Amino acid sequence: MRCGNCNKNIIKAKLGRCKSCMITTMVCSLLGILGNLWMGPNPPMTTPSLAIKLFTFAFMTLFALHVAFATYYKVTGNVPKDDI
Ligand SMILES: [Zn+2]
């Protein structure tokens, strides 16, 4: 994915650094959680149900990575340079 704010296509270079990307992944994970709640506690094993689960898992993992990297950069102050 490419974002107009950070303008980087290397995912490692913007993990935990671009607020716009962090907000996007957070909103997408919240939408996925809402979709899972909307499907109910025991949804049938259909394609939409699996798609919502996969969507939620992917965006929650990405958001967790963003938060982990942001915390690491904040704690250590070891932020990589942009011109690589
Ligand atoms: Zn970005």
Image (tube, helix red, strand yellow):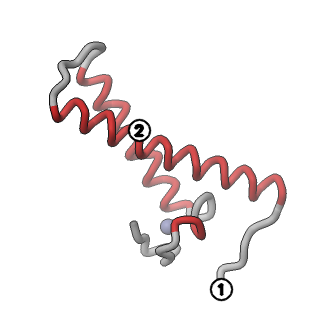
Residue type for callout 2: Phe
- Farthest residue in the right direction? 76
Task: Find out whether the residues at labels 2 and 1 contact each other: C-beta distance under 8 Å.
Answer: no
69 with respect to 32 (left or right): right
Q: Residue at x 80, y 65 (%)?
A: 78
- Pointer 1: what residue? 83
**Can you tell me whether the CB of the residue at mark 2 lies under 8 Å from the nearest atom of ligand 1?**
no
State the SS at label 1.
loop
Residue 33: name its quadrant. top left
- Pointer 2: what residue? 57
Q: Residue at x 31, y 27 (%)?
A: 36
Q: Quadrant of the C terminus?
A: bottom right
Q: Earlier in the sequence, mark 2 or mark 1?
A: 2
- Where 77 sits versus 3, above or below? above
Q: Say few, some or many: other residues with alpha carbon within 10 Å of mark 1 (under 14 / 14 to 19 / 20 or more).
A: few
Residue 73: name its quadrant. bottom right
State the SS at label 2.
helix
- Farthest residue in the bottom direction? 83
Image location of residue 6, percent across then percent down: 52, 74
Residue type for callout 1: Asp
Image location of residue 69, percent across then percent down: 66, 54
Q: Residue at x 58, y 52 (%)?
A: 66
Image location of residue 67, percent across then percent down: 62, 48
Q: Residue at x 58, y 49 (%)?
A: 65
- Where 57 sits versus 9, above or below? above
Q: Quadrant of the N terminus?
A: bottom left
What's the distance in space between the residues labelled 2 and 1, CA to CA? 32 Å
Q: Say few, some or many: other residues with alpha carbon within 10 Å of mark 2 (under 14 / 14 to 19 / 20 or more).
A: some
